[in-house]
Image (cartoon, rainbow, N blue to C red):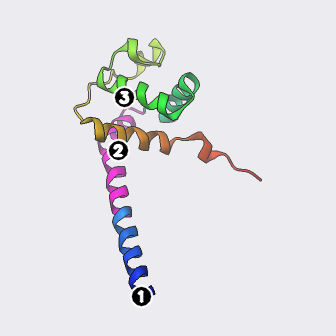
Amino acid sequence: MDKIILLYFLLYAGLYAQESQGEKQQLENQCLQCHMKHQIPNELIYQRYLMKYSTADGMGKAIKEYLKHPKKENSIMPLPFFLKFPMKEALVLDDENLEKNIRMFLDMYDVKKKLVLP
């Protein structure tokens, strides 16, 4: 009986890992690929959103609004930023995938994960 439970657990963990890897690949293909191509500093973007909104929910809503309606007025970046980097085009992702990508982006650059206690 223990072997069966262990086998189900391993299968579930394997499926979850594949799903998580697929979501990460989607984020890489749909978002970060363009950031790398234009050398857009993701850490800087995350820090500016964090300073302005301070919570993951607030940052997620603001990022989603910007990605759906990319205008300089909706952005938290200063105007000189747009002289160096291209203006974002509106995304055509459904809300569910967009929210997953935003959560993964926020999780990837989360400052709390970089804190190390001695």
- Residue type at numbered disc 1: Met
Residue 64 marker: 3
Image location of residue 20, percent across then percent down = 37, 56
Name which residue type carries label 2.
Leu
Mark nearest the camera among 1 and 3 is 1
Instruction: Work out whether residue 86 or residue 112 is closer to the camera in this orientation and state it.
Output: 112
Q: Which residue is mark 1?
A: 1
Which of the labelled discs sits on residue 27, or is there none? 2
Q: Earlier in the sequence, mark 2 or mark 3?
A: 2
Instruction: Describe the element under mark 2 as helix, strand or loop.
Output: helix
Of the numbered discs 1 and 3, the one sitting upstream in the chain is 1
In space, the residues marked 2 and 3 are separated at their CA atoms by: 14 Å
Q: Is residue 59 above or below residue 19?
A: above
Q: State which region is magenta.
A: 17-39
Identify the residue at the far left of this view: 92
Q: Residue at x 30, y 20 (%)?
A: 69
* Picture residue at 41% right of the left edge, 74% below the top: 9
- Queried whether the magenta region covers residue 26, the answer comes back as yes
Q: Residues within 10 Å of mark 2 (few under 14, many from 20)?
A: many
Q: Is residue 40 above or below residue 71?
A: below
